[in-house]
Amino acid sequence: MEKTIDTDIMLSVKNVHKRFDDNNVLNGVNLDIRKGEIAVILGPSGSGKTTLLRCINFLEKADTGSICVNHYTVDCQCRKASSIRTLRKKTSMVFQQYNLFRNRTAVQNVMEGMVVVKGMGKKQAQEIAESTLQEVGLLDKKDFFPSQLSGGQQQRVGIARAIVMQPDVILFDEPTSALDPELVGEVLKSISDVAKLGITMVIVTHEIAFAKEVATRAIFMEGGVVVEDGVPEQVINHPKAKRTQEFLRRINH
Ligand SMILES: Nc1ncnc2c1ncn2[C@@H]1O[C@H](COP(=O)(O)OP(=O)(O)OP(=O)(O)O)[C@@H](O)[C@H]1O
Ligand SMILES: [Mg+2]
């Protein structure tokens, strides 16, 4: 796959700190992700990866720092609901546990954000939802409820739901780690297809082979800071930091 990268910064995380009681989870995270970049975030359990994604879209409020998406900056201490709402609309999140509405069909799940958040008419939303479900290979399952879909299919609905919002950045939090191994491939394939659309993506994952193949950037986090950040070939095959080397050795075994 061609890996061309714009020089324009699409997501900027500056000096983000987050503490839960006496647990300092994020200790000054700085990141600049360029437009069209596919950035994977690697790191051990508890290193703050999910917390970072949640702070980026203000599902969690960081204690200090700022988040900028597509030139719109919000200070993490900002309490203004309209600013937070504006920033939030610029990202979509794909969750580990899919987080679909159980009582809505696949197509209704994909339509929901377009109708409720964007105020789009149902007919148009349905057309977009159906063509996006087709892109992730699920048009024939559009009227199925989540309980009637496999984990991999549910996650592909989750990906379609994220795409239709036309966000500037899609944030994925371990999108395949809840899946049975035989279902991982189909979801990674859908993510690769989205990557080809040129949408900027930040993906927390332990899928090293996928990271090497699809990502343009690999970021290793530990202890709530970015330890190493560079092209996947360098970070994964020739890590400089001792902590990255140890982590990769552990997960390769
Ligand atoms: N809402 C919360 N309240 C208190 N502590 C929290 C909360 N959310 C996360 N933490 C703590 O923050 C730390 C980092 O958690 P986080 O979920 O960000 O790690 P992670 O890197 O995503 O780990 P994993 O790979 O296991 O998903 C953990 O010690 C966790 O217990
Ligand atoms: Mg996590």
Image: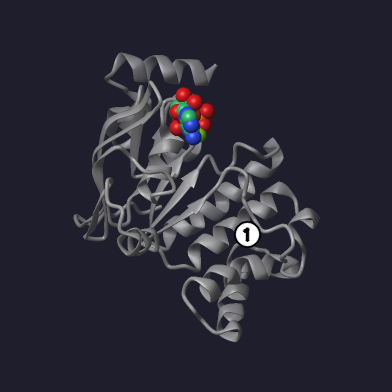
Q: Which quarter of the rendered picture does the C terminus lie within?
A: top right
Number of labels in the image equals 1
Q: In this picture, is 197 found above or below 208?
A: below
In this rendering, would 158 be left or right of 75?
A: right
Viewed as shown, does residue 78 lie left or right of 194?
A: left
In this rendering, the answer to whether 194 lies above or below 39 is below
Of 249 and 204, which appears nearest the observer?
204
14 vs 84, nearest the viewer: 84
Relative to 176, 49 lies left or right: left
Q: Is residue 19 visible?
A: yes
- When asked about the image quadrant of residue 129, the answer is bottom right
State the residue at coordinates (38%, 21%): 22
Near-viewer residue (243 or 192) = 243
In the rendered structure, the answer to whether residue 41 lies left or right of residue 31 reads: right
**Residue on which disc 1 sits:** 157
Measured as percent of width and height from the top left, residue 154 is found at 67, 54
At 46% from the left and 75% from the top, the residue drawn is 118
Mark 1: which secondary structure?
A: helix
Q: Residue at x 60, y 62 (%)?
A: 136
Q: Residue at x 62, y 50 (%)?
A: 98
Q: Residue furthest right?
A: 148
* Residue 231: x %, y % from top left: 30, 37
Quadrant of the image occupied by residue 167: bottom left
Question: Taking 209 as reference, is 47 above or below it?
Answer: above
Horizontal and vertical percent for residue 120?
51, 81
- Residue 32 seen anywhere in this rendered image of the structure: no
Q: From the Cβ of disc 1, is ligand 2 less than 8 Å away?
A: no
